[in-house]
C-alpha cells in the first residue's frame, strides 16, 4: 500500500469513527432530553374535545374512532371521594368528556389539575343516557337490552393516555340551569360549572348527601337558584366518602361537573368543598344553628371539607395560651377533641378549662402539617369553667391512637424527661414542646405528666399546658456543693450528637450537654468553631428545641459567672450579621426551677467576655445554665455560637 492510499484509508476510518461517536453522544443525550416531571410532553394536539364529540352521530350509536388524532385536557374530576367511579373528566377550552377507565384510585395518577393527552384512534365514543363518553368497546346490560360503553383496561392506559403537568387550575364557568339545552353536544356539558345563589329544597334539609345504607346506589336532589326559573339535579353516590354527612341548610355557590341523563341536566360534585351554602336562603331565612358533638364534627374530615352551615360545637378549652400559638385553642367534649384556629381580631381570650361554644358552620375542616383543625373561626362565646377528666395511658398507646386522641387530654404515669423536648416511659418516647414563655420547668422524672395529644409533621406530640401538669417532679441526686472558685475549659468534653441530652464528667464536675449542643474543635482557619485550647462547646437550637448546657453540681454562695462566647464561623448565608446572644439562668433548688440572671450580645468570630451576677446568699447552693438565644433563621435553626472558659466566683 502506498502512502497516498494509506492516508485515504486512515482519513476514511477517522471519519467513520467520528460519525459513530457523534451518533453515540446524540443517542446518550436523547436519554436526558425528557421533559421535567411537571412539564408537558411535546405532543401536538390535533383535535379539540368538542370536535371529537361532534363525531358522535346519534344517541346509542357507539362508534370506534378512526381518526388518528390527539386531544388534551385538564382533569376536572377524579375518583378521590368516590362520587365518580372508574372515570375521570377532562376539559379543554371547547368542552369536556368523561373517560371510562378500569382501575380504582385513578386520582393517584390522574388527579384534578393534571393535564392528560389522549390518542383517540381505536377508542370508542358512546353515551349513557345521552351523555357522551370515551371508552373502549361496548357491552350489554345483564338483561341484554342496553349497550354500555366499556372501560379502558389498565394495561392499555399507557397506549392511549399520556400524562402531563400537575396543578393546572380550571375556573368554573358560571351558568344558570336555564342555559343548558339538553342536547348531547351541548358545550356546557361535562365541564366544571358554578351555579350561584343555589340551595337545597326545604324538604331535603334534614337529609344526608346520600344513602349510607347503600340500599340505593345514588340519591338525587333538586337544586334551584334564587334567580332562575329552572332547577338542576345534584346526583350523589351512596359510596362517596361524604354520603353520610348532612346537607348544608344555607345558600351559595355550587360547583360541579355537569352532565345529562335522558334530557335531565345533572351536576356531580367532587367533594363537599364544592357546596358553599353558608349564606341566607332565598326565603330570607338564615341557616339554623345546630349544636353537634366534636365526634360528629370529625365525620366531615374527608379531606379538606367545608362544614355545613349552621353547625356549632360546645366544649372545654384544654390548651393554655402560654404554650400555644396565638389564636389556637384545643377544645374537648365528652366525645373527642379538635383544634380551632381563630382569625386575627376574633381571639376569644379563653383560658385553660374555660367552657367555649364556637360556630363552625361553613368553615374549612382541614389538615395542617398533619394536625386536624377548623380554621377561620370568628364567632364564639366563653362562659364559666368546665373540666375534662384525663385519659390515663402509656406513650405506646398515645402513639397508636394519636389521630383518635388528637386534641384530648392524657396523663402519663412514671415519666422521664431525657430533655426538655422529650418524654419517656417504660413503653416508648414522645416529643413534647415547651415555649420559654410558658414558665414550665421539667425534671429528670415525674410521678405523672398531663397534657394533650397533638400531631405535627404527621408525628405524635404531647403538649404540656402549665407547671401543674407535672406531678411529683424530681431530679437525680446532685453532687456535693463545690466551694469554688473554679474554671471549666471543656477540654474533657467528648463527642455527642445534637439530638442527645447527656451528662458528662468534666474537670469541674458533671455537666449536662443538652439537645442542640455538641463539643467543637476551635479552628484557626477562620471557619468553624471558635474557642481556646482544643475543645469548645457549640450551641445551635431550633424554633422548638433549646440549646443549653448546665451544671449538675451546686456551688455554695456563688456570686459571679464569667464566660467567653461568640458566634461560630460556619456559613450562615445572609444571616451572618444577625444577633449573637446568650442568656444565663441560675437554680437554687437543684435544677427544679431556673431564673434568668441576664443576657449578653456578642460578635461573630470573636470570643467576648461576659460577667453575670447571681445575687445568691452565702449559704445558697447555686447551679448555672447557659442558653443560646441568638437570631432564629428561616430554616428554624438559630445562629451557632461557641461557649468556653466558664469561671465561677464567690
Image (cartoon, rainbow, N blue to C red):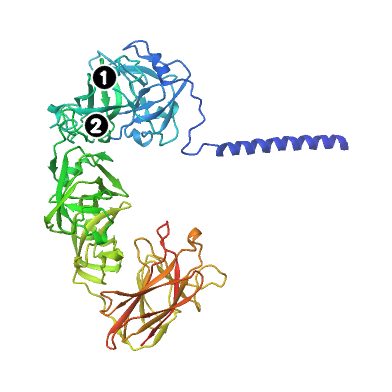
Q: Quadrant of residue 466?
A: bottom left
Residue 303 visible, this angle: no
329 vs 152: above or below: below
Instruction: Please state if 218 lies on the left or on the right of 500 as rendered.
Output: left
Quadrant position of the C terminus in the picture: bottom left
Residue that numbered label 2 is attached to: 252
Quadrant position of the N terminus in the picture: top right
Instruction: Name the spot of residue 316 as percent of width and height, x first.
Output: 15, 54
What is the secondary structure assignment of the residue under circle 2? Answer: strand
Q: In which quarter of the image is residue 282?
A: top left
Instruction: Please state if 536 lies on the left or on the right of 342 as rendered.
Output: right
Instruction: Name the spot of residue 363 as percent of width and height, x first.
Output: 24, 41
Question: Which dot marks residue 265?
Answer: 1
Q: Are marks 1 and 2 in contact (CB under 8 Å)?
A: no
Instruction: Name the spot of residue 48 as percent of width and height, x first.
Output: 44, 20
N-term-proximal mark, 1 vs 2: 2
Toward the viewer: 306 or 490? 306
Cα separation, mark 1 vs mark 2, equals 19 Å
What is the secondary structure assignment of the residue under circle 1? Answer: strand
Q: How crowded is mark 1: few (under 14 residues within 10 Å), some or many (20 or more)?
A: many
Residue occupying the point 34% across, 34% down: 107
Amino acid at each position: 500500500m502506498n502512502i497516498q492510499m494509506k492516508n485515504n484509508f486512515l482519513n476514511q476510518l477517522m471519519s467513520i469513527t467520528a460519525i459513530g461517536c457523534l451518533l453515540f453522544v446524540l443517542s446518550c443525550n436523547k436519554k436526558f432530553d425528557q421533559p421535567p416531571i411537571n412539564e408537558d410532553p411535546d405532543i401536538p394536539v390535533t383535535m379539540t374535545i368538542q370536535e371529537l364529540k361532534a363525531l358522535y352521530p346519534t344517541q346509542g350509536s357507539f362508534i370506534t374512532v378512526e381518526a388518528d388524532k390527539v386531544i388534551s385536557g385538564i382533569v376536572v374530576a377524579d375518583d378521590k371521594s368516590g362520587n365518580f367511579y372508574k372515570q375521570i373528566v377532562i376539559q379543554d377550552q371547547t368542552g369536556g368528556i368523561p373517560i371510562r377507565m378500569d382501575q380504582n384510585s385513578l386520582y393517584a395518577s390522574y388527579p384534578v389539575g393534571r393535564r392528560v393527552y389522549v390518542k383517540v384512534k381505536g377508542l370508542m365514543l358512546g353515551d349513557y343516557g345521552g351523555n357522551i363518553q370515551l371508552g373502549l368497546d361496548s357491552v350489554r346490560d345483564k338483561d341484554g337490552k342496553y349497550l354500555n360503553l366499556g372501560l379502558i383496561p389498565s394495561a392499555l392506559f399507557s397506549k392511549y393516555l399520556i400524562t402531563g403537568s400537575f396543578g393546572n387550575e380550571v375556573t368554573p364557568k358560571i351558568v344558570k340551569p336555564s342555559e343548558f339545552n339538553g342536547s348531547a353536544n351541548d358545550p356546557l356539558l361535562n365541564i366544571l360549572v358554578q351555579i350561584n345563589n343555589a340551595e337545597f329544597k326545604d324538604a331535603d334539609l334534614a337529609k344526608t348527601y346520600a344513602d349510607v345504607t347503600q340500599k340505593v346506589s345514588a340519591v338525587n336532589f333538586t337544586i334551584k337558584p334564587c334567580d332562575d326559573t329552572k332547577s338542576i339535579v345534584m346526583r350523589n353516590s351512596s359510596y362517596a366518602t361524604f354520603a353520610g354527612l348532612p346537607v348544608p341548610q344555607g345558600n351559595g355557590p355550587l360547583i360541579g361537573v355537569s352532565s345529562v341523563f335522558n334530557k335531565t341536566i345533572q351536576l356531580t360534585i367532587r367533594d363537599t368543598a364544592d357546596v358553599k351554602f353558608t349564606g341566607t336562603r332565598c326565603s330570607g331565612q338564615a341557616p339554623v344553628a345546630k349544636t353537634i358533638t366534636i365526634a360528629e364534627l370529625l365525620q366531615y374530615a374527608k379531606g379538606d371539607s367545608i362544614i355545613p352551615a349552621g353547625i356549632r360545637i360546645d366544649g372545654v378549652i384544654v390548651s393554655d395560651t402560654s404554650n400555644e400559638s396565638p389564636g389556637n385553642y384545643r377544645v374537648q367534649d365528652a366525645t373527642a377533641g379538635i383544634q380551632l384556629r381563630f382569625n386575627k381580631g376574633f381571639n376569644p381570650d379563653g383560658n385553660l378549662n374555660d367552657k367555649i361554644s364556637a360556630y363552625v358552620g361553613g368553615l374549612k375542616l382541614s389538615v395542617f402539617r398533619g394536625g386536624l383543625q377548623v380554621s377561620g373561626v370568628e364567632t364564639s362565646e366563653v362562659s364559666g369553667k368546665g373540666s375534662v377528666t384525663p385519659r390515663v395511658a402509656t406513650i405506646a398507646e398515645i402513639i397508636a391512637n394519636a389521630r383518635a386522641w388528637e386534641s384530648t387530654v392524657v396523663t402519663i404515669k412514671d415519666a422521664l424527661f431525657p430533655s426538655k423536648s422529650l418524654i419517656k416511659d417504660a413503653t416508648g418516647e414522645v416529643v413534647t414542646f415547651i415555649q420559654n414563655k410558658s414558665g414550665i420547668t421539667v425534671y429528670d422524672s415525674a410521678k405523672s405528666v398531663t397534657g394533650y395529644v397533638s400531631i405535627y409533621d404527621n408525628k405524635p406530640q404531647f403538649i404540656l399546658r402549665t407547671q401543674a401538669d407535672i406531678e411529683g417532679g424530681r431530679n437525680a441526686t446532685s453532687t456535693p456543693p463545690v466551694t469554688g472558685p473554679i474554671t471549666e475549659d471543656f477540654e474533657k468534653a467528648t463527642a455527642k450528637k445534637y439530638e442527645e441530652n447527656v451528662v458528662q464528667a468534666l474537670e469541674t464536675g458533671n455537666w449536662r450537654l443538652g439537645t442542640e449542643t455538641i463539643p467543637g474543635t476551635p479552628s484557626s482557619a477562620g471557619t468553624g468553631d471558635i474557642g481556646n485550647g482544643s475543645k469548645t462547646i457549640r450551641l445551635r437550637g431550633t424554633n422548638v428545641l433549646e440549646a443549653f448546657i448546665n451544671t449538675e453540681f451546686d456551688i455554695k454562695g456563688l456570686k459571679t459567672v464569667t464566660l467567653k462566647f461568640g458566634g461560630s464561623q460556619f456559613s450562615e448565608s445572609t444571616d451572618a450579621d444577625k444577633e449573637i446572644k446568650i442568656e444565663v439562668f441560675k437554680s437554687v433548688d437543684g435544677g427544679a426551677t431556673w431564673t434568668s440572671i441576664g443576657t449578653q450580645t456578642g460578635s461573630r468570630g470573636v470570643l467576648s467576655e461576659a460577667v453575670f451576677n447571681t445575687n445568691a446568699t452565702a449559704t445558697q447552693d447555686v447551679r448555672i445554665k447557659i442558653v443560646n438565644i441568638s437570631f432564629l433563621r428561616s430554616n428554624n435553626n438559630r445562629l451557632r455560637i461557641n461557649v468556653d472558659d466558664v469561671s465561677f466566683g464567690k
